[in-house]
Image (cartoon, grey):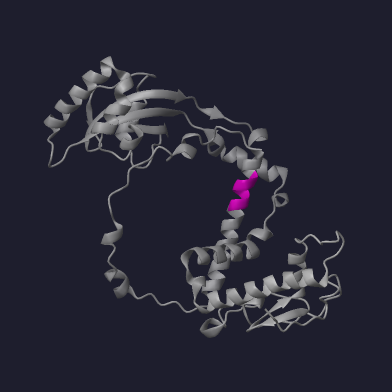
């Protein structure tokens, strides 16, 4: 493959390269075609080493790529090796332009990456841990101690029989009584019976709801949580009505409340303050951006969007779900 290459600066990759030349295509951060004015150029590229369509490959990009290559003589890349590096960058540039021409930057995942890169450049890079004094950190910790306390949690299993058009309350209680009788003599059968009979999203986990705090957990009725906290470890409830059906609960384990000191949570305090600063700066930045574009919401079209296909029943919870939440707060922060 032969390319039209500008060799000035190529032989001396550590040369001056102080002539910033701005391209108008993808290599310089702009878009080709109808979207050419969507994004501002990304900055200096150094001496132009190759023109590729509407873009360029610049010295700065080349130096970064060349630094990742090992010279065959162990000292400096030969002209052939430099050509290989440049050819790779040219190919990437050409492919990037084609992807842009096809509008692939509108893919949801790509858009998310681009937005995150924008916020990293404009917002996150402005905030450092050193921005906050020891007094700032201590003051936040003292006024938000509950955020750094691991609440009391219990691990509970549940069998749930819904009361609905298929089953009356009396029928559900009768079925639950039979299950309860089996569990009293064989508590180790809870998982098996839950997988066979339970009708909540935790069925596949054998009814294991994981570790739950008193404030509850999404999808688990508050009255069920309250009843579970009354149990001792290993204790089984009688069947009771709650949350739209009949429940049988088994308390598996209990973790006490843990209050962690400032010395242990200092790193977590820094992260919380940085996140708060990120949010404040991001909100301001977003408002600035929105003020530069005209936005018109089509209320009638919005109201007519059919979402029924996306509103299925809640999926079942798998064995792997909630692991991170179950163990949240057990490890100390740096």
* Image position of 220 (left or right of 271): left
Residue nearest the observer in this picture, 244 or 45:
45
Screen quadrant of the N terminus: bottom right
Part of the protein shown in magenta:
270-275
Screen quadrant of the C terminus: top right
Which quadrant would residue 57 be assigned to in this image? bottom right
Residue nearest the observer in this picture, 281 or 121:
121
Which quadrant would residue 32 be assigned to in this image? bottom right
Residue drawn at (59%, 52%), measured in percent from left and top? 275
* Image position of 334 (left or right of 100): right
Q: Position of residue 225 (x, y in %)?
A: 34, 32
**Magenta span includes 237:** no
- Counting labels gives 0
Residue drawn at (25%, 30%), measured in percent from left and top? 247
Q: Is there any visible trace of residue 4 in the rendered image?
A: yes
Q: Position of residue 186 (x, y in %)?
A: 29, 17
Q: Position of residue 286 (x, y in %)?
A: 54, 67
What secondary structure is the stretch in magenta mostly built from?
A: helix
* Image position of 299 (left or right of 291): left
Q: Is there any visible trace of residue 213 in the rendered image?
A: no
Q: Is residue 21 above or below residue 234?
A: below
Q: Is residue 234 above or below residue 302?
A: above
Residue drawn at (72%, 43%), measured in percent from left and top? 134
């Amino acid at each position: 493959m032969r390319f039209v290459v500008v060799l000035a600066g190529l032989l001396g990759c550590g040369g001056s390269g102080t002539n910033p030349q701005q391209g108008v295509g993808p290599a310089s951060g702009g878009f080709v075609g109808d979207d050419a004015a969507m994004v501002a150029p990304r900055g200096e590229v150094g001496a132009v080493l190759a023109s590729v369509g509407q873009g360029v490959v610049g010295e700065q990009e080349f130096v970064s790529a060349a630094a990742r290559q090992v010279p065959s003589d162990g000292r400096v890349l030969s002209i052939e090796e430099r050509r290989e590096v440049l050819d790779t960058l040219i190919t990437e540039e050409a492919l990037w332009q084609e992807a842009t021409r096809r509008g692939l930057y509108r893919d949801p995942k790509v858009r998310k990456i681009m937005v995150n890169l924008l916020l990293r450049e404009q917002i996150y890079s402005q905030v450092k841990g050193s921005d906050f004094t020891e007094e700032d950190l201590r003051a936040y910790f003292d006024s938000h101690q509950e955020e750094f306390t691991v609440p009391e949690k219990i691990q509970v299993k549940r069998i749930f029989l819904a009361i609905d058009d298929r089953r009356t309350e009396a029928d559900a209680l009768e079925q639950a009584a039979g299950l309860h009788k089996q569990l009293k003599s064989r508590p180790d059968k809870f998982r098996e019976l839950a997988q066979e009979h339970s009708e909540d999203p935790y069925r596949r986990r054998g009814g294991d709801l994981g570790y739950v705090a008193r404030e509850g957990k999404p999808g688990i009725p508050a009255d069920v949580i309250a009843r579970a906290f009354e149990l001792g470890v290993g204790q089984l409830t009688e069947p009771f009505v709650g949350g739209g059906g009949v429940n049988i609960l088994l308390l598996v384990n209990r973790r006490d409340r843990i209050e962690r000191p400032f010395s242990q949570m200092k790193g977590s305090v820094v992260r919380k303050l940085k996140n708060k600063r990120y949010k404040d700066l991001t909100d301001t930045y977003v408002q600035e951006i929105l003020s530069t574009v005209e936005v018109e919401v089509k209320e009638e079209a919005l109201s007519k969007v059919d979402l029924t296909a996306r509103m299925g029943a809640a999926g079942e919870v798998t064995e792997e779900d909630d692991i991170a939440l179950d163990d949240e707060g057990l490890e100390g922060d740096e």
